[in-house]
Amino acid sequence: MRSVKPPRDEIALGALDRADPTLLHLQVAAEIRRAIADGEALPGERLPQARDIAAELGVNTNTVLRALRTLREEGLLEMGRGRSTRVVGRPERGVVLAKMREVVELAREQGLRRDDLVAMLDTLAR
Protein backbone atom coordinates (compact mmCIF):
# COMPACT_ATOMS: atom_id res chain seq x y z
CA MET A 1 0.00 0.00 0.00
CA ARG A 2 1.31 3.44 -0.95
CA SER A 3 1.89 5.91 1.81
CA VAL A 4 -0.01 9.12 1.48
CA LYS A 5 1.05 12.20 3.39
CA PRO A 6 -1.77 13.95 5.22
CA PRO A 7 -3.37 16.96 3.54
CA ARG A 8 -1.73 20.30 3.97
CA ASP A 9 -3.85 22.69 5.93
CA GLU A 10 -3.45 25.18 3.16
CA ILE A 11 -1.60 25.83 -0.05
CA ALA A 12 -1.04 29.42 -1.11
CA LEU A 13 -3.33 30.05 -4.05
CA GLY A 14 -3.38 33.45 -5.70
CA ALA A 15 -6.52 35.42 -6.31
CA LEU A 16 -8.44 34.72 -9.50
CA ASP A 17 -8.88 37.53 -12.03
CA ARG A 18 -12.57 37.75 -12.82
CA ALA A 19 -11.85 40.32 -15.55
CA ASP A 20 -9.60 37.79 -17.32
CA PRO A 21 -11.42 36.01 -20.16
CA THR A 22 -9.77 32.72 -19.10
CA LEU A 23 -12.41 30.37 -17.69
CA LEU A 24 -12.41 30.18 -13.88
CA HIS A 25 -11.75 26.43 -13.74
CA LEU A 26 -8.65 26.95 -15.92
CA GLN A 27 -7.47 29.74 -13.61
CA VAL A 28 -7.97 27.45 -10.60
CA ALA A 29 -6.05 24.66 -12.37
CA ALA A 30 -3.24 27.11 -13.15
CA GLU A 31 -3.00 28.15 -9.50
CA ILE A 32 -2.85 24.56 -8.27
CA ARG A 33 -0.34 23.70 -11.03
CA ARG A 34 1.82 26.64 -9.88
CA ALA A 35 1.61 25.50 -6.24
CA ILE A 36 2.80 22.04 -7.27
CA ALA A 37 5.62 23.50 -9.40
CA ASP A 38 6.71 25.72 -6.48
CA GLY A 39 6.84 22.73 -4.13
CA GLU A 40 3.92 23.83 -1.97
CA ALA A 41 2.28 20.47 -2.68
CA LEU A 42 4.70 17.62 -3.28
CA PRO A 43 4.17 14.21 -4.90
CA GLY A 44 2.46 11.92 -2.40
CA GLU A 45 0.77 14.72 -0.51
CA ARG A 46 -2.97 15.18 -0.38
CA LEU A 47 -4.56 18.45 -1.37
CA PRO A 48 -7.18 20.20 0.74
CA GLN A 49 -10.76 19.25 -0.05
CA ALA A 50 -12.36 20.89 -3.08
CA ARG A 51 -14.84 22.76 -0.93
CA ASP A 52 -11.98 24.27 1.11
CA ILE A 53 -10.16 25.38 -2.04
CA ALA A 54 -13.44 26.78 -3.39
CA ALA A 55 -14.01 28.77 -0.20
CA GLU A 56 -10.46 30.15 -0.29
CA LEU A 57 -10.82 31.27 -3.92
CA GLY A 58 -14.44 32.37 -3.70
CA VAL A 59 -15.70 30.02 -6.41
CA ASN A 60 -18.21 27.20 -6.65
CA THR A 61 -17.02 23.75 -5.56
CA ASN A 62 -17.90 22.40 -9.03
CA THR A 63 -15.43 24.89 -10.55
CA VAL A 64 -12.67 23.44 -8.36
CA LEU A 65 -13.72 19.87 -9.15
CA ARG A 66 -13.53 20.65 -12.86
CA ALA A 67 -10.03 22.09 -12.36
CA LEU A 68 -8.97 18.99 -10.40
CA ARG A 69 -10.25 16.73 -13.21
CA THR A 70 -8.18 18.76 -15.70
CA LEU A 71 -5.08 18.26 -13.57
CA ARG A 72 -5.89 14.56 -13.21
CA GLU A 73 -6.01 14.27 -17.01
CA GLU A 74 -2.59 15.96 -17.15
CA GLY A 75 -1.20 13.32 -14.83
CA LEU A 76 -0.60 15.69 -11.91
CA LEU A 77 -3.29 14.45 -9.54
CA GLU A 78 -4.91 11.21 -8.56
CA MET A 79 -8.44 11.45 -7.28
CA GLY A 80 -9.29 8.60 -4.96
CA ARG A 81 -12.44 7.39 -3.34
CA GLY A 82 -14.26 9.83 -1.18
CA ARG A 83 -12.58 13.17 -1.04
CA SER A 84 -8.93 12.22 -1.34
CA THR A 85 -6.95 14.04 -4.02
CA ARG A 86 -3.20 13.66 -4.03
CA VAL A 87 -0.32 14.95 -6.08
CA VAL A 88 1.31 12.27 -8.24
CA GLY A 89 3.28 14.25 -10.80
CA ARG A 90 5.02 17.47 -11.67
CA PRO A 91 3.73 20.08 -14.18
CA GLU A 92 6.41 19.15 -16.70
CA ARG A 93 4.84 15.70 -16.99
CA GLY A 94 1.51 17.29 -17.83
CA VAL A 95 3.01 19.17 -20.75
CA VAL A 96 4.53 15.98 -22.15
CA LEU A 97 1.24 14.13 -21.71
CA ALA A 98 -0.64 16.88 -23.58
CA LYS A 99 1.82 16.67 -26.47
CA MET A 100 1.53 12.90 -26.52
CA ARG A 101 -2.25 13.20 -26.81
CA GLU A 102 -1.73 15.47 -29.82
CA VAL A 103 0.57 12.90 -31.41
CA VAL A 104 -1.89 10.07 -30.78
CA GLU A 105 -4.69 12.07 -32.38
CA LEU A 106 -2.51 12.93 -35.40
CA ALA A 107 -1.49 9.28 -35.74
CA ARG A 108 -5.14 8.20 -35.72
CA GLU A 109 -5.91 10.75 -38.43
CA GLN A 110 -3.03 9.30 -40.47
CA GLY A 111 -4.23 5.73 -39.99
CA LEU A 112 -1.39 4.62 -37.71
CA ARG A 113 -2.00 2.00 -35.04
CA ARG A 114 -0.73 1.72 -31.48
CA ASP A 115 2.04 -0.68 -32.49
CA ASP A 116 3.23 1.84 -35.09
CA LEU A 117 3.42 4.57 -32.49
CA VAL A 118 5.23 2.37 -29.98
CA ALA A 119 7.82 1.43 -32.60
CA MET A 120 8.32 5.09 -33.54
CA LEU A 121 8.70 6.11 -29.91
CA ASP A 122 11.13 3.28 -29.28
CA THR A 123 13.27 4.43 -32.19
CA LEU A 124 13.24 8.08 -31.00
CA ALA A 125 13.99 7.24 -27.37
CA ARG A 126 17.29 5.57 -28.16
Image: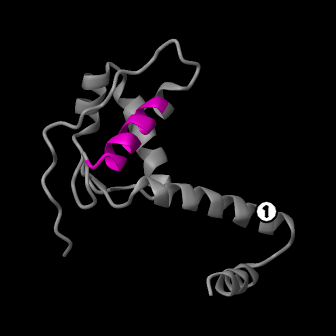
Whether 122 is drawn above or below 14: the answer is below
Q: Quadrant of the N terminus?
A: bottom left
| Kind of residue at badge 1 | Leu
Q: Residue at x 30, y 31 (%)?
A: 13
Whether 32 is drawn above or below 59: the answer is below
Whether 106 is drawn above or below 47: the answer is below
Horizontal arrangement in the rendering, residue 110 relative to residue 8 (left or right): right
Horizontal arrangement in the rendering, residue 21 relative to residue 108 (left or right): left
The x and y percentages for residue 54 are 30, 27
The x and y percentages for residue 41 are 25, 49
Horizontal arrangement in the rendering, residue 39 relative to residue 111 (left or right): left
Q: Residue at x 16, y 48 (%)?
A: 7
The x and y percentages for residue 82 are 25, 50
Residue bounds of the magenta highlight: 27-39
Q: Residue at x 54, y 17 (%)?
A: 20
Quarter of the rendering containing residue 42: bottom left
Whether 67 is drawn above or below 21: the answer is below
**What residue did someone put label 1 on?**
106
